[in-house]
Amino acid sequence: MFDFGVWLKDGKTYIGDIALKNLDYRIPKAEIALHFTSWPGTKAYAQEALQEIRSFAFDTLGMNKVYMRCCAAAAFYEDLPRHAALHMKVLCAATTVEWILTNSWT
């Protein structure tokens, strides 16, 4: 598991964290988990963190698949991948949305 805390440069204020978990190097794949405080005020920071963790997963770790799930109770995170300009495939179930991020910037 790789867990990264996110702090503001001004005042060193902690605003959240983002992690790669459930790593499976046989496929290779990983799941993104995130939590940010003061939502939606930290949304832009969460989008930036999502772009960075995507790059870390694909470019540094060599993952082939990175996914992120969102339950209905946390639907406010639902549009993060879209607004972070991440390429993805969306899988929907009655209570969960799962994004599969791809390693393509075009």
Image (cartoon, rainbow, N blue to C red):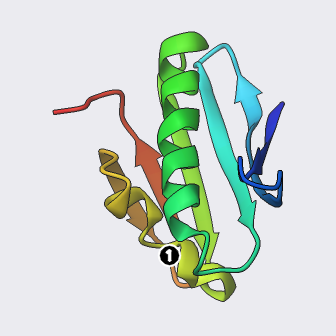
Return the x and y of residue 90 as percentages of the image width and height.
37, 60
Left-right relation of 79 to 56: left
Q: What residue lies at 35% left-to-right and 27% top-to-bottom?
A: 103
Left-right relation of 90 to 36: left
Return the x and y of residue 65 as percentages of the image width and height.
49, 31
Q: Total number of numbered labels?
A: 1
Secondary structure found at label 1: loop
User: Dot 1, crowdedness within 10 Å: few (<14), some or many (≥20)?
Assistant: few
Q: What residue lies at 71% left-to-right and 57% top-to-bottom?
A: 34
Left-right relation of 66 to 87: right
What's the residue type where badge 1 is placed? Ala
Q: Name the residue under label 1.
A: 93
Q: What residue lies at 72% left-to-right and 79% top-to-bottom?
A: 38
Among the 4 quarters of the image, the one containing residue 104 = top left
Q: Establish if 61 lies above or below 48.
A: above
Q: Establish if 33 lies above or below 103.
A: below
Return the x and y of residue 54 as percentages of the image width and height.
51, 34
* Furthest residue in direction front, as rendered: 10
